[in-house]
Amino acid sequence: MTQFERPSKRAPESLREVSLEVGKSRYAEGSCLVKFGHTHVLCTASWTGDVPRWMKGTGKGWVTAEYGMLPRATHTRGRREAAAGKQSGRTQEIQRLIGRALRSVTDLEALGENQITIDCDVIQADGGTRTAAITGGYVALALAINYLKEEGIISTNPLVSQAAAISCGVYQDVPVLDLDYAEDSNAMVDANFIMSSDGRIIEVQGTGEERPFSREEFLAMSDLADAGCKELFALQKAAIDNA
Amino acid sequence: MTQFERPSKRAPESLREVSLEVGKSRYAEGSCLVKFGHTHVLCTASWTGDVPRWMKGTGKGWVTAEYGMLPRATHTRGRREAAAGKQSGRTQEIQRLIGRALRSVTDLEALGENQITIDCDVIQADGGTRTAAITGGYVALALAINYLKEEGIISTNPLVSQAAAISCGVYQDVPVLDLDYAEDSNAMVDANFIMSSDGRIIEVQGTGEERPFSREEFLAMSDLADAGCKELFALQKAAIDNA
Amino acid sequence: MTQFERPSKRAPESLREVSLEVGKSRYAEGSCLVKFGHTHVLCTASWTGDVPRWMKGTGKGWVTAEYGMLPRATHTRGRREAAAGKQSGRTQEIQRLIGRALRSVTDLEALGENQITIDCDVIQADGGTRTAAITGGYVALALAINYLKEEGIISTNPLVSQAAAISCGVYQDVPVLDLDYAEDSNAMVDANFIMSSDGRIIEVQGTGEERPFSREEFLAMSDLADAGCKELFALQKAAIDNA
Amino acid sequence: MTQFERPSKRAPESLREVSLEVGKSRYAEGSCLVKFGHTHVLCTASWTGDVPRWMKGTGKGWVTAEYGMLPRATHTRGRREAAAGKQSGRTQEIQRLIGRALRSVTDLEALGENQITIDCDVIQADGGTRTAAITGGYVALALAINYLKEEGIISTNPLVSQAAAISCGVYQDVPVLDLDYAEDSNAMVDANFIMSSDGRIIEVQGTGEERPFSREEFLAMSDLADAGCKELFALQKAAIDNA
Amino acid sequence: MTQFERPSKRAPESLREVSLEVGKSRYAEGSCLVKFGHTHVLCTASWTGDVPRWMKGTGKGWVTAEYGMLPRATHTRGRREAAAGKQSGRTQEIQRLIGRALRSVTDLEALGENQITIDCDVIQADGGTRTAAITGGYVALALAINYLKEEGIISTNPLVSQAAAISCGVYQDVPVLDLDYAEDSNAMVDANFIMSSDGRIIEVQGTGEERPFSREEFLAMSDLADAGCKELFALQKAAIDNA
Amino acid sequence: MTQFERPSKRAPESLREVSLEVGKSRYAEGSCLVKFGHTHVLCTASWTGDVPRWMKGTGKGWVTAEYGMLPRATHTRGRREAAAGKQSGRTQEIQRLIGRALRSVTDLEALGENQITIDCDVIQADGGTRTAAITGGYVALALAINYLKEEGIISTNPLVSQAAAISCGVYQDVPVLDLDYAEDSNAMVDANFIMSSDGRIIEVQGTGEERPFSREEFLAMSDLADAGCKELFALQKAAIDNA
């Protein structure tokens, strides 16, 4: 009988080695270099003391995100989006996702009329860049919030929960956690879970890449994500507390 | 005690009135005007006997989709994307979703080196345009496939399953099916299910708009979607058979 | 002797079957689905209570138009302009023409600082889309004007005349009215007349596609247009009165 | 009784001073600096020994035109189109018109698979730039054709007629020829006639700027244009013969 | 022994025939048609009584430049930048250079909140278009400044020095002045000097096209530029004084 | 008497701390993270076994560069160029400069029909990003060349010299080396020198930001650059040898 083995040799429920390094940017109000194995994303949080025009006067703040990938972050060089003259549909989809996720754990009224922009730039990509970006982007956001509190710009903490994200998939009919590029390319099913630290789902996107998936498979992936995000929440907390 | 009531007065598990009118385009190889209540989407399927450059010589075909909305499909006029000079991130996200969904039920090898482009143009919008587009787009695709078979361009049916889609949400803490615009704007949780006719999930996207959601809520929405899509599969079948 | 016959079998002076259906849009202040035979154009009129920046403070209003064509409105699928990232020269030329024509019958001072945007979207195209758009666009405009009067936003009727448009051509050396696509592709001469209901010319564009044309041919086409527009004015009036 | 007088003091049927200087470009296969009074347009004809992709193998050639205006050609500086990132609708409309007009007098089969591009760049603008461009563009085209014959690239003359253009208008209810900017801005009716040297109309565009116009007014303008173009044909012939 | 000879037969230290014709534009506040041999650039200076938004309220003015080239200014036709939809990197680099050079000799405080835009449009190109543009652009600027003084818009002369520019190169190992296109294409080293009339350098750009260059070669080119610009300063002064 | 002191406290002839770390990219054929003090630029070299279309069949290779800056590389967040839809003139100017510099030390014939693209992405910016990019880009290029030799793709070393770059300036009338942002913002004169390892100049760009500069000042800066680049050449050699 053939033994099931992931290309990464990891157990189905194992994350890659994850690190969250803070203070990597000299200028940003908050920053975090997040590594999920060979996937490295630099997340910076930039504060401005005003909001987009359509929000002025509402008393509420705004959190938004932008995503990019260095041309040679990947195995073969991709076209630079600035040279192509537009962001791809994939890029826009990811940055909209990051922004929604981080806004969902932020009380925009408590933020006041401040805007925080999270830039997530992929330095090196080996699968799971969007989940790494959300996980690291939360840390950058939390550090910028701390800065705003220290500076007296806001008085109450607008963060209502932590947010972290992880991918799951069905690889050779086995549900697995945190797919790298080799696994992702060969997965039958692929799902990204964004979780809040109370164990609920902020957003889920599941795709049957090669075949539809059953509810049972979905639940198995949901269990994996739940456990994986618990690990990520602990790492986020440690990184923020030690900053 | 306050009675729960949807703005549409529908029961939680009720679809809007759905119709799938075929043959609305004089020229397209397949077409379907799909109506989910006041949401009207014209779906056309256009065939070309070649494939994108990166697929040439593979022996496989391609199914892709484009999505658009007439400027005054909505309550207030939106900017025409052609005049703005680009498709919004939302538009690109939706058309990528439609394309993925329809490819997932198509055996691209059986299609041979043919391409079918599904255009989904929203004539009037009252919530759920992407789920209507997938549901009607499938019908247009199936009719174009029938045309290719009749013309002898392909010999076997590349469609391996039907695909349909429906939205669910949590409205005033009650899971409900097929949100219209008024309901969608006030839903706490919003999810789109794309199902195959064997009862499995092709793609799911769930978002906690106002708060995260629990696994139980997800499962309740999944049940609603399951039943709703069964109705849609029957309507699709009738529309295609009677064309 | 060979008998002259148009591909459409119509007499030289015959319009295609024309219909003007109002109330096809649930949201627009005025709307009209105009059909010239197989050419179908959805015209909506959208009101906003302000004017472009360069007109602010003049006390005058503005009427403008945008034109688009669904990708599969035609025999073969055309590229979606929103995806191409720009409107073609042809599209811009047509929408400028529609706007000029409708402004020419509107007293912009009587309109006050209101703007009405006419969207003309071609659902199906079989020649003469610009003349259908002007003819249907006028109806949508008139209905929006009626709405503004009913709402008390304006008090006097700014419409000084009806406007309608029709194409003429010289087909096999015979002047004919209202060319469909098959006729237009083979016409030697092609002209579009935009007329006011007092029998004068608002705008004329005549092109010798295959050969120059004489003044006599121009006058014969002008007679045909004159009679054709009289029919259109009656249909417009009926549609507006019955709305 | 008030005497009618044009701002330019010219008689209704008088052209501005027109000159057609050839050989103004050191490199182009044909060139002509055309002046209609203070309107100055540099027209160059550039030859390439191939045709656009969609024409390859047809044995036919192509004539096309591009139009531009220096930013300070006008009283107040206009935005540079290259900086704006696109050509205006007006620019595209004009260059399509110039191209159509010059193709209409060219036998594309006799041209063989050669392309001639006419660039019309307005150095100074005082009304009538499109008519000057067509009139001078014809001269540049004819000179390039002569060059191709001298070089043995083509053997027969593909030009079947001369083409020239002039504007007419109704100014203070009087039909007048060749409007300058001051007259054009105040004309009630404005029409551009493109004529062939056999006295027929290649293209006409007439617009009731302030009010519709009658057939009688159209005929009076047509007479003026007829006589004006006769003068232009003589000047074109002299310029080409003396080159 | 082979005699060194430039393609242009000029001595190493000789400028091409240079002319600076003023008053070539009927509308611009200042204008100059500059010719360096067959290189012809029309420079116009356009005044507006306000400044870019980021300068409002500073009390200072602004001088900026735009550069363009007619498509057939060169031996073979280049693509029109307006049609391409963007300015090339080369164009942007040149217009930034022209703007910097002219600002460097302008006291922006003395200019008050006025903006002068210098348009440099290359009518014909035979090498050295950027140096001709700066040299002629200065004349156009000075004439516009004179206009502003005459109109009482400014009271003191904001020009602190003249600015002129010339290219140098190393051709067949000999330093030479003012390269035309044939020389420039074959130069080993190419440098552009922008000088002020007090003999200092405003900007220098030197490139080893085929090989690096030594400090001695740089100094020899600098000497040539110094002498060449003295001639240009005299021509500028004469042109401005005689305007 | 006031003592001259640079904001950075460095002596006029002192470089910032410079480091060149290789192997920072898992995928690129060559890579170098270059630090000039707080200025950090990631340089990657990407190889493709073909050349741009216009070079095919020439037997020669190509080296080109692209430059970008992360939005929060600077004190205040800048707009992401991919989102803006175009690269700024500054970006294009810098990447053209990097490409020219690296091509100037490469024998393109010896490279064969291979292309190497150098991506220079600024992670953090504190002045001198273009000189750091050239210095680090050379290292990435050299490592990619070594890779091509090891793989047997090329047999001879196409690099004919090292290339490095450093900025100089005149700060408070004193010539100084390697300006950081604070110094650059207040320099009277600013020059970038790109040198070859034989002590010659590949390219120089000098600008009198606040006033023109004399030949003596230029020579003093040239001496500083000469010495500074010697240090950089040694660091480059060590980094490449130890890779």
Image (spheres, coloured by chain):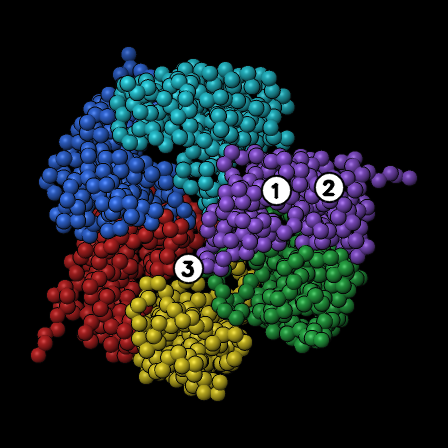
Chain colours: A yellow, B red, C blue, D cyan, E purple, F green
Q: Chain of mark 1?
A: E
Per the image, label 3 sits on a secondary structure element best described as helix
Callout 1 touching callout 3 (CB < 8 Å): no
Q: Chain of mark 3?
A: A
Q: Out of D50 and A31, give the one closest to the viewer.
A: A31
The residue to which callout 3 is attached is A89
Relative image position of residue D51 (x, y in whole percent):
53, 33
Reply above or below: A235 against C234. Answer: below
Q: Earlier in the sequence, mark 1 or mark 2?
A: 1
The residue to which callout 1 is attached is E139
Q: Are marks 1 and 3 on the same chain?
A: no
Res A105 quadrant in image: bottom left
Relative image position of residue D194 (x, y in whole percent):
41, 23
On the question of residue E55 being in view, the answer is yes
Q: Chain of mark 2?
A: E
- Disc 1 to disc 2, how far (Cα)? 14 Å
Left or right of residue D206, residue C11 in this image: left
The residue to which callout 2 is attached is E231
